[in-house]
Amino acid sequence: MKQDETMKVKRYDDTNVNPDFVAERKKCTFNIELLTNIIDGSSYLTETRRQAQLAVLNNESFSNLPDRYYASRDEAYAQNIRKSAAYIKLLKEDKSISRAESYFMQCLIFPNEVPPFSLHTTMFTPTFESMADEEQKKLWMPRIENYEILGTYIQTEMGHGTNVRGLETTATFDPSTDEFIIHSPTLTSIKWWPGGLGKTCNCAIVMASLITNGRNEGIHPFIVQLRDFETHEPLKGGLTIGDIGTKLGFHGMDNGFVKFDQFRIPRRNMLMKSAKVTRDGTYQKEKKLEKLKYGSMVFVRAMLVFNQAGQGLAQAVTIAARYSCVRRQSEYAPGQEEPHIIEYQAQQHILFTELAASYIFYIAGNKLRELYFTMNYDIQKGDLSDLPELHALSAGLKALTLDEAVVGIERCRLICGGHGYSAASGIPKIYTEVVAACTYEGVHPVLYLQTARYLLKVYQAALLSSSASSLPDNQSSKYIFRHLHSERPRFHFPLSFVEIVEAFERRALMCIEKASKKLDGLLATGRPHHEAWNYSACYLIRAAKAHSHVYLTSSVHEQLETVRQEDAGVYTVLGQLFELYALKSIVDHAVEFIESCGITTDQINICIERIEALLLNIRPNVLPLVDAFDFPDRLLGSALGCYDGNVYQRLYEYALNSPLNKSTVNVAYFVYYIAINIS
Amino acid sequence: MKQDETMKVKRYDDTNVNPDFVAERKKCTFNIELLTNIIDGSSYLTETRRQAQLAVLNNESFSNLPDRYYASRDEAYAQNIRKSAAYIKLLKEDKSISRAESYFMQCLIFPNEVPPFSLHTTMFTPTFESMADEEQKKLWMPRIENYEILGTYIQTEMGHGTNVRGLETTATFDPSTDEFIIHSPTLTSIKWWPGGLGKTCNCAIVMASLITNGRNEGIHPFIVQLRDFETHEPLKGGLTIGDIGTKLGFHGMDNGFVKFDQFRIPRRNMLMKSAKVTRDGTYQKEKKLEKLKYGSMVFVRAMLVFNQAGQGLAQAVTIAARYSCVRRQSEYAPGQEEPHIIEYQAQQHILFTELAASYIFYIAGNKLRELYFTMNYDIQKGDLSDLPELHALSAGLKALTLDEAVVGIERCRLICGGHGYSAASGIPKIYTEVVAACTYEGVHPVLYLQTARYLLKVYQAALLSSSASSLPDNQSSKYIFRHLHSERPRFHFPLSFVEIVEAFERRALMCIEKASKKLDGLLATGRPHHEAWNYSACYLIRAAKAHSHVYLTSSVHEQLETVRQEDAGVYTVLGQLFELYALKSIVDHAVEFIESCGITTDQINICIERIEALLLNIRPNVLPLVDAFDFPDRLLGSALGCYDGNVYQRLYEYALNSPLNKSTVNVAYFVYYIAINIS
Ligand SMILES: Cc1cc2nc3c(=O)[nH]c(=O)nc-3n(C[C@H](O)[C@H](O)[C@H](O)COP(=O)(O)OP(=O)(O)OC[C@H]3O[C@@H](n4cnc5c(N)ncnc54)[C@H](O)[C@@H]3O)c2cc1C
Ligand SMILES: Cc1cc2nc3c(=O)[nH]c(=O)nc-3n(C[C@H](O)[C@H](O)[C@H](O)COP(=O)(O)OP(=O)(O)OC[C@H]3O[C@@H](n4cnc5c(N)ncnc54)[C@H](O)[C@@H]3O)c2cc1C
């Protein structure tokens, strides 16, 4: 990124900080900057992020006016488009902006939003690049990279999401004109949901059933121009395009629909890297490239652990923690000033367990991203052996961390009391955006079942093998081999970190065993496989969750081992968070641990007491621990969660800006007044 | 209510019902109407409700145009005001409308909303009636009943909610003018949150610290005129009034703020039933009336169990269940048509457990309401002995049922996949409104702790007594006495209904014992009481939750015993739902049951298997079970959850109405287009 003198303003203004915060921050026992580097991945990445964020903060084109919480849908969309134009212009002008920099910039320009053009970069371009042949790339890529073409990814239909094979849209080859005819034969086949489709994008990759010579060859990708490049009007010839309407969140995003009515595209708009249709309608495909389709989905899921579950929860925790250090409420010690609500154990129990979870998701998300890049390196070289592992791991982790994160975000909001319900708290926005990720890129019951399917395979293999050696070291399911043939240890309480990891592994193995037994039992009664599978679903899902917990604990434990070498202070606090998250999970699923680890209810009670001790340990560092996330105020968008702790001034300013306050008397009132007084 | 010929239209249109629904409904094994009567309380109430709902559906003034999900905040507010005027006009014109009828009407006129005037009826009028003296009532009531005065209830300040004693607003008596001076001395003392305060109400009851003769006499209620009765302008002389801004939900409600700057009101605007200030500034109070203040709060909380937790969850379940019987997805049996998603065990596990919970909250909520009326009868006669019990019970139940309901509502939304995220599903609206009730009328950690305080008192009394006889029969905490001195039985699996109730009681007793021990242990180390109490909070909260579960199971069990006499079919299905809810709760808190009931992990596994069997039992009745809630389509406001099951047509219509679809090209796009192409 080009450096600019004006960018050297301070990120945080230390004057005018709430004195309660000054006092809190003095209690810190560790090096915050070091922890920030760990979260970011390195000190270099911390610096990169800060520079990118400063560039955004210093650029007026990226301001959020009107206030994002007051914008109507129309305004929210228009605002996003305005910022998108400025952002894309910047990317075009400054070719030195790196991928990491643009990622950091985009997060802050569109705080807790997925902007309308985002599918162009996350799905449209990567899919095009991996599915188009060289000639097609040469033809299209310049205009794609240039944003003249702005594309979205169109797969889901009104009637089909999970089951891609069930998609009804057809692309029928017409040899007489050398064209495909794209068609939506039914109401349910209308394409539905794609981001940016409603109003923004002029092109798309459309997934449709390829029909040639009367044969249905299955789902294939096509690049389709939807709107005129000059007028932006939808093209004539059989397109109905629109926005699908208001949603829980995503207000500034035009998720859209398109109905194809015998709409024609050239034959060469089929992406032809792994399959093609020749001029005479002959269908040909290259089998070995088939599996590569998974690639981008696995990548996006791996990212969600980090940037939705981890970052979303961390933001909510930051807000709730800061507010809890400002807010005073309730009589505590007789005759004394009301304490900050952070002093209540009930508050700590919720806040600190969510703080711990956010660190776990963040760090495990980082590890998963690294794992992806390592494995993807091999995959791209044609070695697909790691793909099932990566697929199963990212599916389960996406589901588990998001499931836990969204509940956590709402818990953080609720412990802010009334002001948490105000949009000004910032948490409602975080919630409505993050919870969307529980649905896109795969609904959770389905993802858990996919993970479970893989686990059962590994388990079968482990039953047949006598050692763990047949699995490569980086496989998260290696413990299945390891523990199947080894004796269960005696666990000592309080559990050591190593014992914690093993306890999670033993529990997961037991859940997998149980699922396998359940399935076998049903098969043994003569049920067909699909039925036996369905009626094992609850067991299978428990197994997938337990396995995902193993990755969370073991990968964070691994990180802890590295930190131990580096810094005692950071090791201590990170260790406390690790232990808190782990013990809370053990208590929440106590029966599974009792059964699998041979422990007792008394030992569970020790965990419960230990959790309370950890709350006390974490207490002095709570503000520094959220400061370490280093979220700019603009990102949080919260009156309750600002770095300076000046909560009440901001709440008041927020209220004064309410559109309903433009006049002292709302015109609507007169309708009422007249109606009531005439009678 | 006056009868009207035109009202006799059909509630449900049976023509054009989705054939899948017709088939589903044929599977029903019980008498739906009977179950509906149980939910409503009686067949008479069912009839009353239907008539009231028909009156709303037949009255065009109550239509929701613009579509409620597309309204901006301004429009949402204006729409509510328009409907409020029509509704209040109706109430004024037709004095035969009963309380029950007006309640049912209001629910349907403002589906899943709290309308701007609602505090007038729920808080302002009842508080005025119970706190004003006879002369004051004579003076004000005619205009209050006439809606000339439209009042709200102003207690919360920016800085204080839970701790009412911490309120900073002062009402200082000025004997020179015979007036009180209402004043907000600080930023945090600005009154904040009251419903209808921002734009709608012209009067309010304001809670403020009474100061006379230099002494602070504590918080008292004052009736304050805020706006001119003719022009509706805020009164001159020291008022700043406004809306507090956009929130997570409650868009059509003007929660407001008011800052008092030495604002003067006549002395006689202090409500003087239980305390007064004489002309010379002497303060006098009647001690025995003090506790009555609690009354309306207890009532509102008791109602929330029924109309927010029960009804809110039931609506979400209705939508998810109907959609699950329409939606087909995923390959199941090879070569066969995709099944309805209701056939997946994973789907059933979530949907049916939430269905069960909604029935439990509904029925227990009904019982609680009855209990309130019985006990309130004594209370009004001056016998306050039941008040602590009622207070503790309603606090814990409000918290527990809402905690469980809001998680359940989101689970129902998530199992609808992508369309659940659309506002058209109706569930986002249900969620954002119901979850507000987790905050108003008391935040949950605080409510649980209040319940726990009462439980410990009962426990202490039970320790000292040798029998249960000292507690009246209607006391929900009677089991503490009963079980403390009796031997624990052997439980048999699967548990009978009677055993289930006892298991919950045993578990609650153990949690109370543990909390008591924890507290005593900390006190024994010499900690001051407030500290010991704080560091027992986690134990205390567990005890309060466990106690609330006892009421849920025992009151529904009681209802079941009645139903058993009446109808075998209804008894069977209601019994299945009861068992499912209970077993799910046992499994979720297994360790507590293992410890308290002396059961084993194997027996927990039996419960897990039994849950799966119950899913199969409930399956054929799922549509009839949600039909029995008898929610009009208008109330649900859901494309996915309509009675006729025509999901896709409605989704498409919804999309076509999106304001973003008014033009084919959004003007915002040109900003983008120009910016990008100029560079
Ligand atoms: C905010 C948002 C953005 C989106 N963006 C895009 C986009 O850009 N492009 C695009 O193409 N799509 C997009 N989508 C669509 C998204 O990919 C789908 O919603 C998602 O894949 C789920 O599919 P579905 O909605 O059809 O649900 P379904 O597949 O119909 O599933 C509904 C429910 O049925 C149950 N179920 C289904 N199958 C099974 C099974 N085999 N076993 C057990 N239970 C099952 C599950 O509970 C599931 O939740 C978006 C969606 C959202 C919410
Ligand atoms: C939609 C809505 C409508 C409302 N309508 C009205 C109205 O009409 N009139 C009106 O006067 N008010 C109204 N309110 C305000 C409402 O009554 C308060 O928000 C509520 O009482 C909580 O108070 P608080 O917000 O000040 O939270 P606080 O009391 O500050 O509590 C914040 C958090 O601190 C923690 N905490 C506080 N005390 C303790 C303790 N002793 N032990 C443990 N933890 C503790 C809890 O986690 C709590 O969530 C409304 C609020 C909402 C959200």
Image (tube, coloured by chain):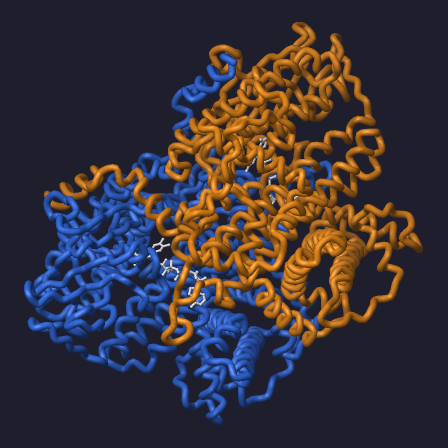
Chain colours: A orange, B blue
Q: Which residue is more in the foreground, A560 or B411?
A: A560
Q: What residue is shown at x 46% (from left), y 75% (from top)?
A: B452
Quarter of the image that includes the C terminus of chain A: top left
For the residue pair B630 and A13, the one nearer the viewer reads as: A13
Image x and y of residue A84, in percent: 50, 25
Residue A596 picture quarter: bottom right
> In the rendered image of this protein, does residue B319 appear above or below residue B74?
below
Q: Nearer the viewer, residue A209 or B322?
A: A209
| Side of A211 relative to B176 (left or right) | right
Q: How many marks?
A: 0
Q: Classify residue A20 by image quadrant.
A: bottom left
Quadrant (top left/top right/bottom left/bottom right) for the N terminus of chain A:
top right
Residue name at image x 76 percent, y 41 percent: A371
Q: Is residue A229 above or below residue A648?
A: above
| Rendering quadrant holding ligand 1 | top right
Q: Which residue appears at 29% of the width and 52% of the height?
A: B195
Question: Residue B648: x and y, percent?
Answer: 50, 34
How far across and how far down the image is residue A594, in percent?
72, 69
Residue furthest top as drawn: A176
**Left/right of residue A446 with respect to residue B433 in the rendered view:** right
Q: Is residue A66 above or below residue A531?
A: above
Residue A468 lies left or right of residue B337; in this view the side is: right
Residue B270 in view in this figure: yes
Q: Position of residue B673 (x, y in %)?
A: 48, 16
Q: Residue furthest right?
A: A466
Which residue does the image show at 43% across and 73% down from the upper left?
Answer: B451
Residue B509 visible? The answer is no
Q: Nearer the viewer, residue A621 or A651?
A: A621
- Name the side, left or right, on which A253 lies relative to A464: left
